[in-house]
Image (cartoon, rainbow, N blue to C red):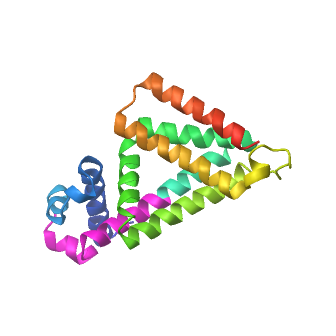
C-alpha cells in the first residue's frame, strides 16, 4: 500500500510524463507540472528540489520500464531469430500504441548530450539493451565465414541493431509515417537485422 507521500510523488511523476510527452523537456516548467498534478509548487520542490531531479527520477522509472518490458518480451522467443523478431516487433508496437513513451525517451536521449544525469540513465539503458541483444539474439558463436559477425563481432553488431531500431523510431515519430510505410520500414529493418546476425 502506498503512503500519501508516495502517492503525491507518483502523481507528480505521472503529470510530468503527460506534459513531457506533449511539450518536451525544454517547454515544461515546474509550475506547469504542479498545475497538471494539481499540487502546490512547494510539494514538487519538497520531493525533487529541481526540474532536473524530477526528470532524472522520471528517466529512471522509464529506463526500468523499458528494459524490463523488452526483457520480458524477448524471453518469449524460443531461439535467436524469434527473439530478434520480438524485439523489432516491440519497437514497432511501442511506436503504434505508446508513442508518448518513445517521444519522452527520445527527448531524454537528446538532453543526455548536455545533462550528466540523463546521460547516465540513457547510456545505461543503451548498454543493457545492447548486452541483451548480444547475449539473447547473437548468442551463437560466429563462424569465420559470417559476412558480418565474423568480421565485426557480436558487441558491435548488437549496437548497430539497437541503433537501427532507435533511429527508425526517431524518423517515424518525426515524420508521422503512415501505417503502410511503417510496416515496410520495419520489414526492411528485420531483413537487414537478419543479414547482420548471420
Residue 58 visible somewhere in the drawing? yes
Tell me the magenta residue range: 39-64
Q: Quadrant of the C terminus?
A: top right
Residue at 46 percent of width and 22 percent of height: 180
Is 21 situated above or below 123?
above
Instruction: Confirm whether the magenta stretch covers residue 181.
Output: no
Instruction: Confirm whether the magenta stretch covers residue 59.
Output: yes
Residue 158 pos. (x, y %): 65, 52
In the rendered structure, the answer to whether residue 83 lies left or right of residue 36 reads: right
Residue 73 pos. (x, y %): 60, 46
Which picture quadrant has residue 175? top left
Is 133 situated above or below 147?
below
In the rendered structure, the answer to whether residue 47 lies left or right of residue 197 reads: left
Is 81 situated above or below 123?
above
Q: Nearer the viewer, residue 45 or 169?
A: 169
Is 7 situated above or below 139?
below
In the rendered structure, the answer to whether residue 54 lies left or right of residue 156 reads: left
Residue at 21 percent of width and 70 percent of height: 44
Amino acid at each position: 500500500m502506498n503512503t500519501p507521500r508516495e502517492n503525491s510523488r507518483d502523481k507528480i511523476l505521472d503529470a510530468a510524463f503527460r506534459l513531457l510527452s506533449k511539450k518536451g523537456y525544454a517547454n515544461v516548467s515546474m509550475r506547469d507540472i504542479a498545475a497538471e498534478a494539481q499540487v502546490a509548487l512547494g510539494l514538487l520542490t519538497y520531493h525533487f528540489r529541481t526540474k532536473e531531479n524530477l526528470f532524472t527520477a522520471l528517466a529512471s522509472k522509464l529506463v526500468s520500464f523499458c528494459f524490463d518490458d523488452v526483457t520480458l518480451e524477448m524471453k518469449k522467443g524460443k531461439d535467436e531469430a524469434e527473439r530478434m523478431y520480438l524485439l523489432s516487433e516491440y519497437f514497432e508496437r511501442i511506436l503504434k500504441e505508446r508513442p508518448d513513451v518513445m517521444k519522452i525517451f527520445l527527448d531524454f536521449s537528446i538532453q543526455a548530450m548536455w545533462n550528466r544525469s540523463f546521460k547516465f540513465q540513457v547510456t545505461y539503458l543503451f548498454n543493457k539493451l545492447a548486452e541483451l541483444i548480444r547475449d539473447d539474439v547473437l548468442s551463437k558463436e560466429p563462424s569465420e565465414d559470417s559476412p558480418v559477425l565474423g568480421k565485426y563481432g557480436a558487441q558491435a553488431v548488437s549496437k548497430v541493431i539497437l541503433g537501427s531500431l532507435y533511429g527508425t523510431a526517431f524518423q517515424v515519430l518525426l515524420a508521422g509515417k503512415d501505417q503502410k510505410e511503417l510496416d515496410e520500414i520495419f520489414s526492411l529493418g528485420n531483413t537487414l537485422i537478419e543479414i547482420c546476425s548471420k
